[in-house]
Amino acid sequence: MTMTWHLSSALQITSGSPGTLFQKRDKTLAVSSNIWAFFGTFHSVSLPEEKHLKVLLKLSDFQKKPWVCRKDCASLQGSLQHTSFACCDAQSALPTLSHFLAKFSNKLALHYVPKLVMNDLALWSTCLSSMHLSCSMMPRPDYDPGLHIDTSSSFGVGFTIGNKYASWFLIEGWAGKG
């Protein structure tokens, strides 16, 4: 299930008492106030220290193992996905772990962790080493630079920025071998 979080939703959830229920379609989720700390004035979310240290320990233990099972990988992936709300800088390092998790054929299989995954986990480790994780929930301004690009295998490449235009023609034989 995918959930989209908006500032108004977070304000509604966090304004209630611990155990407030958040309803999405036909599913109801219990939201505990001790999972996320929300600072209304600054419009940001923060991971409580206890949860922060628990995720950091889980990550450290995972990195020390020569091979891992699906359960360990899924547990870490879930924790990091949850943490990514407060650790925005490492969000881009989550897909490699998710892709690795998809390679497990069953719950008993063991796999060596690929170097690319270990590199991304090192980024997570660096991010989680900061003792205060928080992320702004303020909407980012939209920016349209007015850039439009078009390509054609018979013509070439052209683009416009505002009212300026540039193009490059393909050279004869560009589609030939080697």
Image (spheres, grey):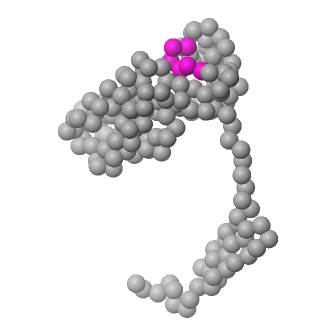
In the rendering, at what x and y percent does residue 86 appear?
52, 30
Instruction: Locate the C terminus and report the quarter of the image it occupies.
Output: bottom left
- Does residue 117 show up? no
Quarter of the image holding residue 2?
A: top right
Note whether 178 is above or below 106 in the view shown: below
Q: Residue furthest left?
A: 66
- Does residue 81 show up? yes
Instruction: Locate the N terminus and report the quarter of the image it occupies.
Output: top right
What residue is shown at x 19% (from left), y 39% (from top)?
Answer: 66
In the rendering, at what x and y percent does residue 157 appear?
63, 77
Note whether 100 is above or below 22 in the view shown: below
Numbered-mark total: 0
In the rendering, at what x and y percent does residue 51 appear?
42, 20
What residue is shown at x 70% (from left), y 66% (from top)?
Answer: 148
What residue is shown at x 49% (from left), y 41% (from top)?
Answer: 89
Q: Residue furthest right?
A: 163
Q: Give left or right: position of 109 versus 43.
A: left
Quarter of the image holding residue 138?
A: top right
Q: Main secondary structure of the magenta part?
A: loop
Q: Residue furthest bottom?
A: 172
Q: Give left or right: position of 126 versus 174.
A: left
Asked if residue 34 lies in the magenta stretch, the reply is yes
Asked if residue 177 lies in the magenta stretch, the reply is no
Query: 65 or 172, which lies in front?
Result: 65
Question: In the image, which residues are magenta?
Answer: 33-38
